[in-house]
Amino acid sequence: MLYFYLALAGALAFALSTLTAGGGALILLPVLSFLVGAKQVAPVMNLGNFIGRPVRLILFWKHIYWPIVGYYLPASLVGAFMGAWLLSSFKSETMQLIIGLFLVSTIFQYRFGKRKHSFKMKLWYFLPLGFLIPFISTLTGALGPLLNPFMLNYEMNKEALIATKTFNSFAAGAVQIGSYTFFGSLYGDMWLWGLALGAGIGLGNFIGKKLLQKISETNFRKLAIAFMVISGVLMLYKAIFA
């Protein structure tokens, strides 16, 4: 039953996350913590994500915005490796508090979805972001919504945003999984848990792609902003009270 629950949770979370430009992993954090234990969350989450991403990658391949990949991807590989190296000793509560405040503030930055931009975004900004976001994601297991404000301010449409994030995340995921294994954070039954989760995530990505076609760019932006705020609140709660 554990494998079934992992697959079901992955399918539901990532069907929703396709509509909100990320955040499926954040939805899964408390579920995985309950099912497999808090210490195993980050490796299992990232393994499941890595297994499930090819489905989303195939579905959205033609929408990838390659200039962003050129800046983001090289730094993301370094960030993922460094995060796995520090996983066993790093305390993420302070980082979650800062990120949570930033995500909550997006509802005011975009004036509740009425503004199209909240700050000017340049292409080279994706270079430092490429290191920072995979680094923190490797430590915590979930950080998808953090990149959204930067991509929305770069005027990405819904398909290009999802496709570009997915490609970068998949490449960084290969480094994450290899590094988790090398440093002894991914072992034994965790591989089977990640496989079950990944199968569900793949199904959720397929369902989410079908649903995404039915919503407008404006509604997609509003959903993405709403979920950034919800994700921020959850991170603040975890950092303060967990």
Image (cartoon, grey):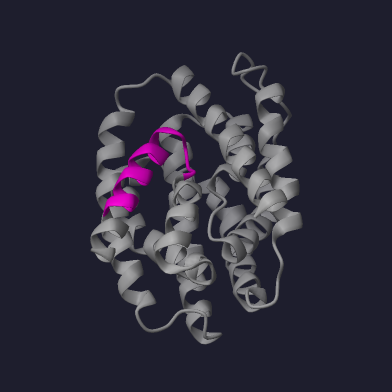
Left or right of 26: which side holds 125?
right
Q: Is residue 229 above or below residue 84?
A: above
Residue furthest out toward the top: 114
Q: Residue at x 62, y 18 (%)?
A: 112
Q: Residue at x 43, y 54 (%)?
A: 31
Q: Locate residue 152, reporting x and y percent.
A: 58, 31
Q: Locate residue 162, reporting x and y percent.
A: 44, 41
Q: Is residue 198 above or below residue 61?
A: below
The answer to which quarter of the image holds residue 132 is bottom right
Main structural element of the magenta stretch: helix, strand or loop? helix
Q: Locate residue 155, reporting x and y percent.
A: 57, 28
Q: Residue at x 37, y 45 (%)?
A: 13
Magenta stretch encompasses residue 107: no
Q: Residue at x 44, y 60 (%)?
A: 34
Camera-nearest residue between 233 and 202: 233
Left or right of 109: which side holds 14?
left
Tell me the quarter of the image containing the N terminus.
Answer: bottom left
Camera-nearest residue between 211 and 241: 241
Q: Please provide the residue range marked out in magenta.
A: 8-23
The answer to which quarter of the image holds residue 128 is bottom right
